[in-house]
Image (cartoon, grey):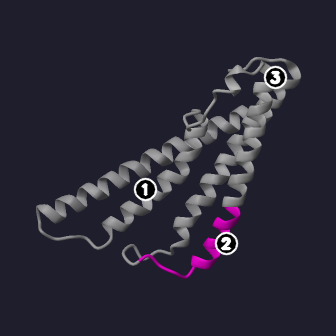
Amino acid sequence: MRKKVLKALDKIEDTVLIAMFMTMVGVIFFQVIMRYVFNNSLSWSEELGKFLFVWLSWLGISIGHRRKEHIKITLLVDKLPYKLKKSAEAITELILIVICGITMYYGVIMINIQMNVPYAGIKISTAWGYLSLVLGCGIFIIRAAAYFLEAVKCIFKNEIIT
């Protein structure tokens, strides 16, 4: 069941991020054409590009974690026996869950504070920008919890999962 949920989450994440990236590139390209070919700048395009970049960044942290591509120093952990290595991974996942939980908490506070403050160019609430932080950290927590459970399972059942 857990693997099905994570696979569905992976598919949704990938699709949303690809669509956002294509939109961001399209909007920025359109702005460049408008500015340098037609000598007319759009008031909303730069802000929309930045907005989409923020969303891509916060939602992208979960994909980096899924692919295990975030920077980490494993010099000591790589030398540990298997069970200690898995214990270190479980502790790391717990720490990441706490950090993302705290970040989500303050993100929700910022959403409430910024609810009535609009972006100047795209005329939507700045709370939408902070929502990316909350969703990105929430998805990260789901993934980190799955990795934590996987590490604990490996510790107690002596299973080797790469």
Task: Indicate left or right for 64 with 30 as reference.
Answer: right
Task: Choose the circle earlier in sequence order: 3 or 1.
Answer: 1
Whether 149 is among the magenta residues is: no
Q: Nearer the viewer, residue 34 or 8?
A: 34
Q: Are there few (<14), some (14-19), or many (20+) residues within 10 Å of tag 3?
A: some
Q: What is the magenta segment's predominant secondary structure?
A: helix
Task: Choose the circle earlier in sequence order: 2 or 1.
Answer: 1
Q: Nearer the viewer, mark 3 or mark 1?
A: 3
Which SS class for mark 3?
helix
Residue at 64% x, 53% y is 137
Q: Are there few (<14), some (14-19), or many (20+) residues within 10 Å of tag 2?
A: few
Residue 32 position within the rendered picture, expressed as x and y whole percent measured from the top left: 21, 59
Whether 107 is among the magenta residues is: yes
Residue 61 position within the rendered picture, expressed as x and y whole percent measured from the top left: 56, 46
Q: Which residue is mark 2?
A: 109
Q: Which residue is mark 1?
A: 53
CA gap, disc 3 to disc 1?
40 Å
Residue 52 position within the rendered picture, expressed as x and y whole percent measured from the top left: 43, 58
CA gap, disc 2 to disc 1?
22 Å
Label 1 amino acid? Phe
